[in-house]
Amino acid sequence: MSVLLEVLKANEAYAASFGDKAKLALPPARRFAILTCMDARLDPAKYAGLSEGDAHVIRNAGGRASDDAIRSLVISYKLLGTKEWFVIHHSDCGMQLFDDEIMSGLLEKSLEGATIDETGWHDHGHGPGSVHGRYIKWHTFKDLAASVVEDVKRIRSHPLVPANIPIYGYYYDVKSGRLVEVPEATAVGRATA
Amino acid sequence: MSVLLEVLKANEAYAASFGDKAKLALPPARRFAILTCMDARLDPAKYAGLSEGDAHVIRNAGGRASDDAIRSLVISYKLLGTKEWFVIHHSDCGMQLFDDEIMSGLLEKSLEGATIDETGWHDHGHGPGSVHGRYIKWHTFKDLAASVVEDVKRIRSHPLVPANIPIYGYYYDVKSGRLVEVPEATAVGRATA
């Protein structure tokens, strides 16, 4: 069976026993958000005990505090009332195994309309607000705990992020399923108002 | 009990019955990726039938094809071998209920180091590669199906995205749990090689 058919079949079963979930409200009931990695081995609902309706979950390659992740967190707080945020990276992350140079090598043969120069990879496209025409930052990292600290710092110091939101820094151990605190990150992320 | 303690307690229970999941490989076993919304009511693993290890899940406010989502999809394909992608927005989305003007109004009283001018919101910070110093696009939308088409188009036409990846466009109905196809999006997303 194709992936598409498998997904639609699984969805049919889910919808068939949907029950009370139709009544869930838009704002997260438990008023928190998790920023974590897209990695297939991570299921944030399972590793953090979430039911549908509980919390926002933001995911990208690495669980990085990219501009877009910060956009999502600001919306999460400002429009939908979350009061606490988690940044959760994980061991054995692809963003740690690879670096920007490897990405460049892998992309070299498959690029259309893109060039490389002394400042890195660029592509040429559709103007402002798009990745086109700008340098692409892949957000790779070398040290797992340091990457969590860096991201909590970036969020904490962002002018759109209020001082009264605590940000907890953790990583997920893919060999045990455990969340491990990064105390330096949590210290940086402490609410100051 | 605090949210932090609840999460750690739930995680302890999850890790206690972790079993064979320690052996999962880094690349997604079922070789696909889903881009969807951070909305608390959505559990992509449940609505699409994913087990740990199966597929990449990328989430942001709206499930939008932002630069960062495209970064994640390119990594998903190029480093980790996914071959099919889903873009899945949903009904009753915050990004449809609000617009950039409402965001501006809500932020007006809470901004530090940010200004508004005729081109929109800006903040002033830490130089290139950061959201600081640039206009912030909130990625709100008016029409649900049109937003799926727009995002599939943006991904399809991106120079880093290979032509041989099919992109399926769907939305999730929060009242029924069902995935509903957006045929125009899936048509745009068809693989051409």
Image: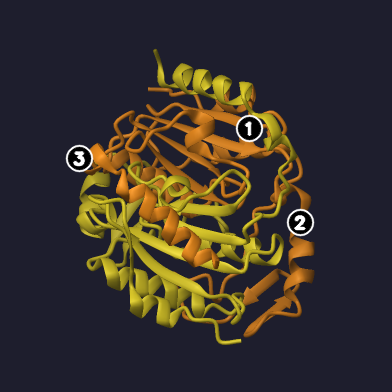
Chain colours: A orange, B yellow
The x and y percentages for residue B183 are 34, 77
B187 with respect to B130 (left or right) = left
Instruction: Give the residue number, with chain letter if any, for mark 3.
Output: A23
Of the 4 image quadrants, the one containing the N terminus of chain A is bottom right
The x and y percentages for residue B117 are 29, 61
- Label 2 chain ID: A
Q: Residue at x 69, y 60 (%)?
A: B80
Instruction: Give the residue number, with chain letter if any, for mark 1.
Output: A171
Q: Secondary structure at mark 1?
A: strand
Q: Secondary structure at mark 3?
A: helix
Q: Residue at x 51, y 54 (%)?
A: B58
Label 1: how many Cα within 10 Å (few below 14, some 14–19, many 20+)? many
Marks 3/1 in contact by CB < 8 Å: the verdict is: no
Q: Earlier in the sequence, mark 3 or mark 1?
A: 3
Q: Eyeballing the image, is B151 above or below A13? A: below
The x and y percentages for residue A38 are 57, 50
Q: CA distance from mark 1 to mark 2?
A: 20 Å
Q: Earlier in the sequence, mark 2 or mark 3?
A: 3
Q: Eyeballing the image, is B90 above or below B191? A: above
Instruction: Give the residue number, with chain letter if any, for mark 2.
Output: A99
Task: Indicate the quadrant where residue A162 lies.
Answer: top left
> Looking at numbered disc 2 in the image, what kind of residue is underneath it?
Asp
